[in-house]
Amino acid sequence: MTQPSPILELRDVTKRFVRPLDLAAKIANLFGAGLKSETVHAVDHVSLGVSDGEVVGLVGESGCGKSTLGRIVAGIHRPTTGERLWRGTAIDALPPSEQRAVELKVQMIFQDPMSSLNPRLRVSDIVGEAPVVHGVVPAAERDAYVGELLQRVGLDAAFRRRYPHQFSGGQRARIGIARALAVKPEFLVCDEAVAALDVSIQAQVLNLFMDLRRDLGLTYLFISHDLGVVEHLSDRVIIMYLGRFVEIAPTEELFRAPNHPYTKALLAEVPRLDARKRDFAPVKGEIPSPLNPPPGCHFHPRCPRATARCRAEVPALKEIAPGRWAACHLNDAR
Amino acid sequence: MTPNRPTLVVEGLRTHFFTKAGVLKAVDDVSFAVSRGRVLGLVGESGSGKTVTGFSLIGLVDPPGRVVGGSVLFKGEELVGAPEQRLRALRGNRVAMIFQDPMMTLNPVLRIDTQMIEAVQAHDPKVDRETARARARDALGRVGIPSPDERLKAYPHQFSGGMRQRVAIAIALLNHPDLVIADEPTTALDVTIQGQILYEVQKLCRDTGAALIWITHDLSVIAGLADEVCVMYAGRVVESGSVGDVLDRPLHPYTVGLIGSVPSRNRRGQKLAQIPGMTPSLLNLAPGCPFRARCARADQACAEPPPETRPVPGRTLRCFHPQSAHPGTGRAA
Ligand SMILES: Nc1ncnc2c1ncn2[C@@H]1O[C@H](COP(=O)(O)OP(=O)(O)OP(=O)(O)O)[C@@H](O)[C@H]1O
Ligand SMILES: Nc1ncnc2c1ncn2[C@@H]1O[C@H](COP(=O)(O)OP(=O)(O)OP(=O)(O)O)[C@@H](O)[C@H]1O
Ligand code: SF4
Ligand code: SF4
Ligand SMILES: [Mg+2]
Ligand SMILES: [Mg+2]
């Protein structure tokens, strides 16, 4: 199974954040505490290629680096090291005008539809400003264009005169989507885009994403901690743990036969409608702090199959079957 | 499972908020019961009245809200209208509440041991400090906190979110309550941590025989944890029954829609069976079935409020035109 050439690619990308000392720590230092600022490896040497029209799901627990990775893909964060490519060309190598064109092709949709919409602007400005500024539509056609977009996402075109607070959560999510679509992107990064919504409203928005994919040929990176949502939408799923990819697989295969012990644990814990009055048998241990991750395999303190090697050596992400990748030493023994 | 009287019997509970904009019927004629060692799931979307129901049971509703009717019998004792002093004595003792935010239970400026010893001694002043401390240590161990002796000396901010929630649960269960009301305590937590907490809570209720009310918007959690379920919509229980019956053979169009919108219930990549429209505002809600603007089966009859019926033993329903009750109807018509 050879992948078609990717529309967007990350090559060996790392993102580090330096967390400066807070006031208490600075004061402690005056008394000789010797505290240093801390570095978080939010994303730690990951590579990723997304094909045209593909939906890639990204799953992992809080703080594992999903949003950071999403922002890098969307061009909001620059990676500390590594490269980002659009249709085979390194974006940094492009002339500035072309870089801007590429940035418009990748749009991000955020979790909280309220805080990402400016409360003082009317919907017509929220949705219509960027396409006019970037010359996607002439200013004179703005209103008609916004009306069209609102209908596209299932809202009444007359809503363009209103302000964000006049909408329900589900409607605000749709406005956020209309805003992203306004600059005619080819690639959407959805970061927990339905997490704040009620189940019945969530279903409406997920259906909209599927319609848009079909009608506009969009490509998605779909970030969610909800495995059910990711399973439903994605062609391929990436499981992330503390900044690293631990498993990548086509969706059906991942859910049928997970390889990595963390993936297995995660799938076992997902509450399911058809799993009645079950005995919960949890993964032990806390999610470790990304400030001070365990050495070797980050998962080893919680892994039922960890060995001495796991504590010392980082397992490489290896192709274990065509199109399937996992980072676990157990795969070497087979 | 002795056929004793249930631990809690709620009958026709009504809690209204008297706001400047009008009367908001947050809880409108809600009835259910939960017995020793059993888990009742209270499920519904945002604003359906789950939290206010939980608060109403133990006198935690503040003005402009007021319990305006109904009865809450806790082991035979009427709690609606009971003196605040009596309710306070029951809370944190015979009845425990676990909140979504554990800091509702924990005091940020006190060490964990101080808080737990206080909780034990408030319940039973005769217990000395050392015994109370030992009880606290055991309680932390039981909810899966490693090295509880050291952890007792920590402050809440030194714990992760999941650990804090476990400490809050340990405190809630310290005095072996007869009834635990848990309001979305795992909603903010990761799947593996949620799994750990569900495991502890399940075990503790099994071991101590506490009756548990688990409030959530997540039907899948209810499926795995609860014995009975009440589906709430717009302040009312629109359908209730055993988890198996309600999830496999839903009768109310809203329950049918809710189950249909869960992604894992659908073929991968297929359109989800969505419910059109959105939940109505409870403020000055028009009479009649509150679901009718979104309901494919609605007709003129639904302009009247549907009464609570018992279509089959063990089920309650509020709908004039329920889905027929044969298997394989877990989808919207
Ligand atoms: N701007 C920043 N400055 C410093 N640290 C950051 C910054 N953004 C993220 N981090 C840290 O990087 C790590 C990864 O964060 P990120 O938000 O990518 O996680 P996430 O997987 O999206 O988590 P969640 O599921 O909670 O949204 C965390 O430890 C976080 O604290
Ligand atoms: N103090 C208050 N004043 C006025 N209205 C209130 C108050 N508290 C709650 N309400 C209203 O009561 C209704 C029920 O709220 P409740 O918090 O019980 O919902 P819920 O089902 O717990 O929702 P969620 O899933 O969002 O927690 C809502 O319409 C809410 O706006
Ligand atoms: S490398 Fe070792 S610790 Fe890591 S997942 Fe595999 S077996 Fe477990
Ligand atoms: S009473 Fe009428 S409107 Fe309400 S759920 Fe039943 S059929 Fe639908
Ligand atoms: Mg995030
Ligand atoms: Mg609530």
Image (cartoon, coloured by chain):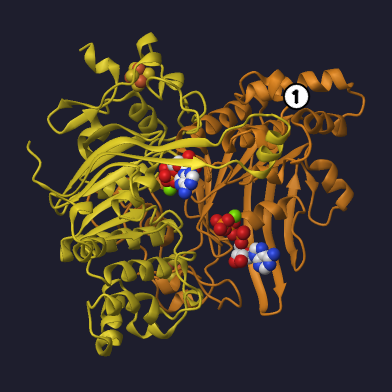
Chain colours: A yellow, B orange
Residue B183 drawn at (x, y percent)? 61, 47
Residue A32 drawn at (x, y percent)? 70, 29
State the quadrant of the C terminus of chain B.
bottom left
Up the image or down, A289 lies above or below A114; here it is above
Examine the rendering and report whether any part of residue B254 can be seen.
yes
Q: Quadrant of residue B12?
A: bottom right
| Viewer-closest of B74 and B59 | B59
Q: What residue is at 27 percent from the left and 34 percent from the top?
A: A255
Q: Amino acid at mark 1?
A: Ala
Residue A111 drawn at (x, y percent)? 42, 57
Residue B36 drawn at (x, y percent)? 65, 33
Please identify the residue farthest to the top as the structure is shown.
A308
| Viewer-closest of B244 and A137 | A137
Q: What residue is at 21 percent from the left and 38 percent from the top?
A: A252
Q: What residue is at 38 percent from the left and 58 percent from the top?
A: A202
Mark 1 neighbour class, 10 Å CA radius: few under 14, some 14 to 19, many 20 or more: many
State the quadrant of the N terminus of chain B.
top right
Q: Which residue is mark 1?
A: B136
Is B245 placed left or right of A46 in the picture?
right
Q: What residue is at 83 percent from the left and 57 percent from the top?
A: B81
| Viewer-closest of B289 and A239 | A239
Please identify the residue farthest to the bottom as the structure is shown.
A140
| Viewer-closest of A115 and B174 | A115
Examine the rendering and report whether any part of residue A305 can be seen.
no
